[in-house]
Amino acid sequence: MTEDVGTIYLWLKALHVISVIAWMAGLLYLPRLFVYHCDVPLASQSSETFKVMERRLLRVIMTPAMLASWLFGLALIAISPAVDWGSGWLHLKLFLVVAMSGLHGMMARWRREFLGDRNHHTARFYRMVNEVPTVLMIAIVLTVIIKPF
């Protein structure tokens, strides 16, 4: 790797890690907001406040961070001459990131349901959902660091 490409690679990696941290923060916080939102009466001032908080978290932090994570991650793959497409760890990581992106999409759908006062899930459901991003994150980090196959 030339010095310029090496420097670009390090910048991309740093930006990727920063965007993943921001995305994870949102993925962990939004279901917690849903838990609290379940406990307030429909159309109450508290419910309306949660709707604003959920919208801002999703639109201002989570979605841009997800897009940046994908952009910087794909750029890292594109710029790295050491990418071995034959190794399974990269395929597993990409599969897990697609799963995390799907979870992000499900959270966006649930936010729209809260927005229309049509939530059908319990606070317990959202407490369980709140654990999924952590499990995915652990699996992704272990896959990237250990490269099991």
Image (cartoon, rainbow, N blue to C red):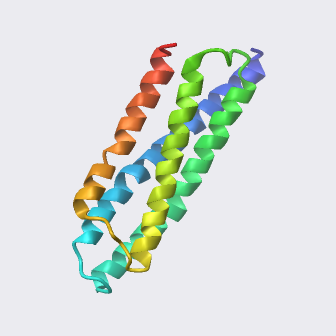
Please report the residue visible at 53 percent of the width from the left and 29 percent of the height from the top. Answer: 93
118 to 143, vertically: above or below: below
2 to 91, vertically: above or below: above
Horizontal placement of 47 versus 61: left or right?
left
114 or 55, nearer to the observer: 114
Task: Give the mark count.
Answer: 0
122 or 134, nearer to the observer: 122
Give the x, y percent position of residue 84. Answer: 67, 15
Please report the residue visible at 50 percent of the width from the left and 35 percent of the height from the top. Answer: 96
Give the x, y percent position of residue 10. Answer: 63, 27
77 or 148, nearer to the observer: 148
Give the x, y percent position of residue 56. Answer: 47, 67
Q: Which image quarter is the N terminus in?
A: top right
Give the x, y percent position of residue 32. Answer: 30, 58
Q: Indicate the quadrant where residue 64 lies.
A: bottom right
Please report the residue visible at 33 percent of the width from the left and 70 percent of the height from the top. Answer: 120
Horizontal placement of 1 versus 109: left or right?
right
Please report the residue visible at 41 percent of the width from the left and 37 percent of the height from the top. Answer: 136
Q: Indicate the quadrant where residue 35 lies.
A: bottom left
